[in-house]
Amino acid sequence: MTASTGTFTPAPRRAPMRTILRSQIRMELVLTARRGEAVVLAMGVPLLVLLGAGLTHATNLPTDDRLGYVVPGVLALTVMSTAFTGQAITTGYERSYGVLKRLGASPLTRPGLLFAKTAAILCLVGLQILALAAVGVVAGWRPDLTELLPAIGVTVLATAAYCGLALFIAGLMRPETVTAAATLIYVLMLAAGGIMFAAPGLGTAGWFLLPLAAHAEALRDTLTHGTAVPGTIWLSLTLWAVVALTAAARKFRWE
């Protein structure tokens, strides 16, 4: 008895890119779930800021609506904490340990890796924002949801910008240097971004220099005041996203 022609003919080929990306995104989420302490840490600082600055008068704010000012800022801070600081440190050590070098030998392309990491972070950020928003609502925050779609749009842009910046520095520096640089940038953004206290007004220029401040202001406009996001903030976050992702795509190294 003979097999029909072609039954056992090898047909090696690369899997479709959508399958490769789907598998990598799932792997990124699984690895993140295994680093539970990192997720807790990324949530811990924003949660302390929310409760400390939103429910007490420990800091001076430019408004009497403390939760209306602090909660949107904390949501923006969470995005930066996860998409930039956590992403940069994790990727820096993955590169140092040779994890990315092995991925480089797979069918996964460099843009594919950047896309998968950004998509996984977007999923994680969405869950974190829902959790913190729920805490804010329990504490007394009453968001205006009439401008919810623009709020989601600026959050996606901010996440893309932070992921691009994180992958850019993680692809160029040693992991110890990445950790120091990411932490320093995080602290500076937190101090100057007007998240838990009134920061010096830098005007429109500040939105281009400090994406955290731009994102926080956009969320206050949409979720607290129910107003449209200023065009300069859209432009600022779009530029940050495009420049950061382009730099990461061009300069990111597997090892």
Image (cartoon, grey):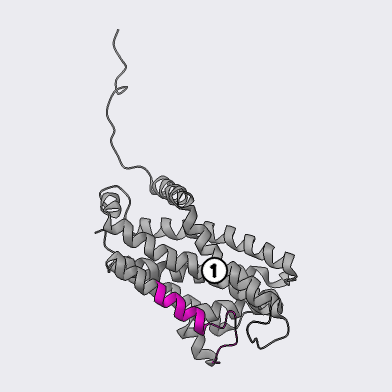
Q: Relative to 217, say whether 10 is above or below.
A: above
Front residue of this view, candidates 26 and 60? 60
The x and y percentages for residue 248 are 34, 68
Residue 8 occupies quadrant: top left
Looking at the rendering, the stretch of residues picked out in magenta corresponds to 183-201
Residue 54 occupies quadrant: bottom right
What residue is rendered at 45% in x and 52% in y? Answer: 35
What residue is rendered at 32% in x and 59% in y? Answer: 93
Taking the magenta stretch, the answer to whether it contains residue 72 is: no
The x and y percentages for residue 130 are 63, 61
Q: Amino acid at mark 1?
A: Val
Taking the magenta stretch, the answer to whether it contains residue 198 is: yes
Q: Relative to 30, say whether 51 is above or below.
A: below
Front residue of this view, candidates 62 and 244? 62
What residue is rendered at 33% in x and 66% in y? Answer: 170
Q: Which residue is mark 1?
A: 45
What residue is rendered at 56% in x and 88% in y? Answer: 199
Quarter of the figure with the C terminus: bottom left
Query: In what element is the residue under mark 1?
Result: helix
The x and y percentages for residue 133 are 66, 65
Count of number-bearing discs: 1
Mark 1 is surrounded, within 10 Å at the Cα level, by few (under 14), some (14 to 19) or many (20 or more) other residues, namely some
The x and y percentages for residue 241 are 44, 72
